[in-house]
Image: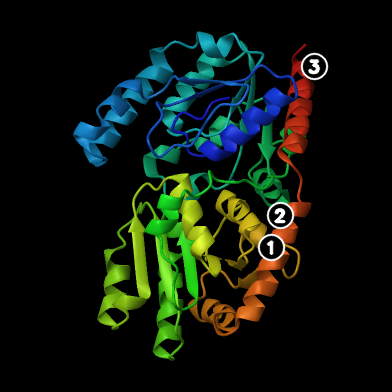
Amino acid sequence: MVDPSLFTGRYDDSLCAALAGEGADVTLLGRPMRDTDAIVPQSYTYRPHYFRHSEALRARLGEGRVFRLAKAAEYGLTCALGDIAPLTRADVVHVQWLPLAPADCLMLKRLNGRTALVHTVHNADAYHADAGLQGRGYRALLDMFDALVVHGDTTRAALTGQGVDPARIHVAPHPPMRLAPATPADLAAVPAASVPRLLFFGTIRPYKGVDILIEACLQLWRAGHPFELVLAGKPFMDVAPLTEAVVQAGFADRLVTDFGFLTEPRLDAHMARADMIVFPYRHIDSSGAFLSALHHGKAMVTSDAGMFGQLPDGVAVRARAGNAPALAQALLPLIESAAIRQSHGARARAYGQAMGSWKDMAVATIGIYETVLAARA
């Protein structure tokens, strides 16, 4: 299993443990662990194969442009000239994320014909059109894999529309996830609110629509509705104009920010303290963040993009993607009524409990491996 940057560490850990539970011999290749990672391998092996040198310099370099350039250079060299024996010894190399398409192409060419190659396409629009060089050439990489795994029909249709052979696409629904639970210290660091609390959590990127969320909240605050908005996660965009707009409007006391790479227990504490959790995404195929929040039983508010548009009625309150007034209208009944919030939260929890398990995911994934290996034989 390969996720060089650990883009989806919780997903990787859950799947690897489940595969091992079904009898597979699994090694996850990623980067050196950070304090914010919560991976504890259960019955599988973790190996820090990528970014060993640049990660060692991270504290000294910071996380700005110099660090990103160092990572890109090291990854390019690893893909072009690095040790691929751990990959070629495997029956199957299952790549979760391809972090730098031009470099990934070099690695895949070296692996071609030497092992079975599988890739999970978490989103058909690589990096949600925010990638620049990072995702340039990503579509061509898909043709280098024996099989592609997707989480739903939205991604399957998108890939087919891009010319991918449908016979190589396998649907394996994404199970719910649980982050490492909040500690008493984490809960103490996220005190309860005296008014209804709305939470956005996870990495902050343009496609996730935080600007739309801010505008919707400003509309509701100006109309006199009391509630609090929490933004918790690492920004990968300039958020200063958004927070400044709240300050200039006179609602600085209504906005709580917890910016940075947050640990899973810290994120779990934010979910535990929230009354509503919002996903105002402009576009998305599937959302691990949404699936990791279901068990908290909080009212969920989403756009109608991707998987959100296919949720059963009542699981989440939906608003048209990219539309701040529609989002404000969707939020208002939840802000005004604790009973409505509790009703929607109960439906979200029940939906998560009824979804498939990681055991189901592992069995389906092993079936995909067996199909690929049989075809190669």
Question: Is there a contact, CB below 8 Å, between mark 1 and mark 2?
Answer: yes
| Disc assigned to residue 116 | none
Closer-to-camera residue (351/271): 271
How far apart marks 3 and 1 lie (CA) works out to 40 Å
Q: Which residue is mark 3?
A: 374
Closer-to-camera residue (36/317): 36
Q: Quadrant of the C terminus?
A: top right
| Disc assigned to residue 348 | 1
How far apart marks 1 and 2 lie (CA) works out to 6 Å
Query: Is disc 3 placed on a helix, strand or loop?
Result: helix
Q: Which residue is mark 2?
A: 352
Q: Residue at x 79, y 27 (%)?
A: 367
Whichever of labels 3 and 1 marks the residue nearer the N terminus, that label is: 1
Q: Is residue 199 visible?
A: yes
Above or below 142: residue 111: above
Q: Quadrant of residue 12?
A: top right
Residue type pointed to by label 2 = Gly
Query: Is disc 2 placed on a helix, strand or loop?
Result: helix
Residue type pointed to by label 3 = Ala
